[in-house]
Image (spheres, helix red, strand yellow):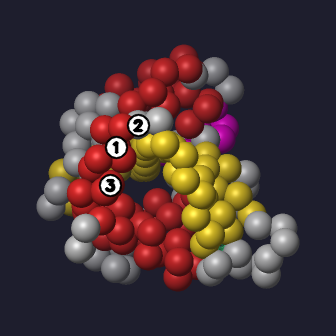
Amino acid sequence: DTATALALPDEAATTRLAAALAPLLKPGDVVALAGDLGSGKTTFARQVIRRIAGDPELDVPSPTFSLIQTYDTPRGTVLHADLYRVADPEELLEIGWDEVGGGVIALVEWPERAGSDLASGALRLTFSIDPERPSDSRRVEIGASDDWMKRIERGLQV
Ligand code: ADP
Ligand code: MG
């Protein structure tokens, strides 16, 4: 596995990272978005979904209360989950969680709440607020398996 940290000095940088990663994603992929409240998980997911959908203004609310939101796009279904309110992984079985890792592109906030094995095949992004920098500065750590790393390297050669 590889871990790399990137600075996201402003929201535009987060949008650029989303734009760079969105083209690589395909059904079956899971992107685990970890990090504290306000660290930028939803902002990142929103930009990825807009890219995949090909609609820069698509309404992508935080799925805080719905837990799961799905989007039909030209590249298949994108599933956006926010598991913050999930206390027990069993709750997930009632809300369409079985599609994750199946035929959808899944973007999952608070992935640790899904229990143990979600993160194994996932591309892991851990966002944090950068306390030493201006207030709109964030950091992201990218944790990628060798397979993910190959796809990212291939995909970023533009
Ligand atoms: P989370 O889903 O992790 O709780 P959100 O994406 O909902 O976080 O909120 C992040 C907030 O921080 C938004 O209000 C966004 O506008 C703001 N923000 C400021 N700087 C950045 C940045 N560099 N990247 C992402 N969001 C940022
Ligand atoms: Mg969020």
What SS does tag 3 mark? Answer: helix
| Label 3 close to label 1 by CB (< 8 Å) | yes
Quadrant of the drawing holding the C terminus: bottom left
Asked whether mark 3 lies closer than 8 Å to ligand 1, one says no
- Looking at the image, which residue is at 79% across and 81% down? 134
Which SS type dominates the magenta stretch?
loop
The answer to if 37 sits in the magenta stretch is no
- State whether residue 1 appears in this view: yes
The stretch in magenta equals 81-86
Q: CA distance from mark 3 to mark 2?
A: 10 Å
Q: Are marks 1 and 2 in contact (CB under 8 Å)?
A: yes
Disc 1 residue type? Trp
Task: Tell me, for residue 103, which label it has, or none.
Answer: none
Check disc 3 and give the amino acid type.
Ile
Residue pushed farthest top? 90
Residue 36: image location, x then y, percent = 73, 52
The quarter of the picture where residue 139 lies is: bottom right
Instruction: Tell me if 122 is positioned left or right of 139 in this view.
Output: left
Along the line of sight, the residue nearer the viewer: 97 or 144: 144
| Residue annotated with mark 3 | 152
Residue at image point 34% right, 43% down: 148
Please give the name of the residue rendered at 62% of the width and 30% of the height, measured from the top-left corner: 113
Residue at 35% from the left image edge and 61% from the top image edge: 21
Read off the residue under disc 2: 145
Question: Where 137 falls versus 140 (above or below)?
Answer: below
Q: Residues within 10 Å of mark 2 (few under 14, many from 20)?
A: some
Q: Is residue 125 above or below residue 102?
A: below
Residue toward you, 68 or 113: 113
Q: CA distance from mark 1 to mark 2?
A: 5 Å
Q: Which residue is mark 1?
A: 148
